[in-house]
Image (cartoon, rainbow, N blue to C red):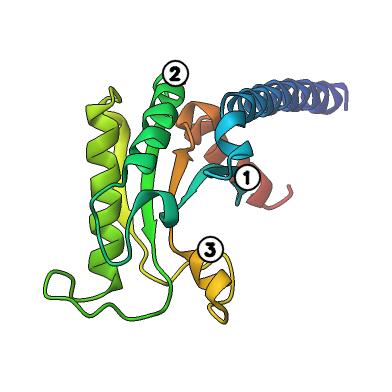
Amino acid sequence: ERQGLGGELDQAKKRMEELRKAQVQAEARAAQFRKLVTQFKALTDAGKLQVEIRENRMIVRLGDKILFDPGKTELKPEGKEALVQVSAVLKDLPNRNYQVAGHTDNIPIKSKRFRSNWDLSTARAVEVVDFMIASGLDAKRLSAAGYADQSPVAANDTTENKAKNRRIEITLVPNLDDLPPIDEALKADAKDQAPAP
């Protein structure tokens, strides 16, 4: 019986240590988010970008109004200025990768260059990635994706809401170092599912 209690105590101590580490990591992520919000304050105050947490991911959102003319992928001067500042901040975050995602509203594009909003959203994301690389971010830390109108932040029912959906989002990709080691997680899961003796 003592052995059983000793084993349970060891497991409880191990779990307490895991929780302590998770709390430290959560506090570090919260501090990083607060620092980012502070660094982006001038741009957020000017209405050029928003910083938010969605689905446990930090996202920097820039509206297409400052970045692109309708149906185009060439960056506007105001968008370039904002991206230079964003790139400078993100470059200084250690061990972080970023996904640049293009989004559109639900109005189909009619152009020789773009067959669909999928093409347009992806081309815009690639344009932003190229500009961020030219601004000093390491290409290895960036990826591009296009979502067309498939991930709206507002209903596509008004002109204002459609404008909200036309955007570029820069997502901080979760760092696998923030997660518990997979082999430990699998062992813990196997123990939880093992039949009682």
Along the line of sight, the residue nearer the viewer: 28 or 166: 166
- The Cα atoms of the two marked residues, 2 and 3, are separated by 30 Å
User: Measuring 57% from the left and 82% from the top, which residue is drawn there?
Assistant: 157
Identify the amino acid type marked 1. Answer: Ile
Q: Secondary structure at mark 2?
A: loop
Identify the amino acid type marked 3. Answer: Lys
Assign the N terminus to one quadrant of the image.
Answer: top right
Which percent across, then down, holds residue 63? Answer: 47, 53
Which percent across, then down, holds residue 60? Answer: 51, 42
Tell me if 72 is positioned left or right of 33 in this view.
left
Is residue 70 something that shows in the picture?
Answer: yes
Q: Which mark is residue 21?
A: none
Q: Which residue is mark 1?
A: 53
User: Measuring 46% from the left and 21% from the top, which residue is drawn there?
Assistant: 93
Which percent across, then down, holds residue 64? Answer: 41, 56
**First reached walking from the N terminus: tag 1 or tag 3:** 1
Along the line of sight, the residue nearer the viewer: 40 or 80: 80
Q: Which residue is mark 2?
A: 94
Is residue 56 something that shows in the picture?
Answer: no
- The Cα atoms of the two marked residues, 1 and 2, are separated by 19 Å
**First reached walking from the N terminus: tag 1 or tag 2:** 1
Q: Secondary structure at mark 1?
A: strand
Q: Which mark is residue 164?
A: 3
Identify the amino acid type marked 2. Answer: Pro
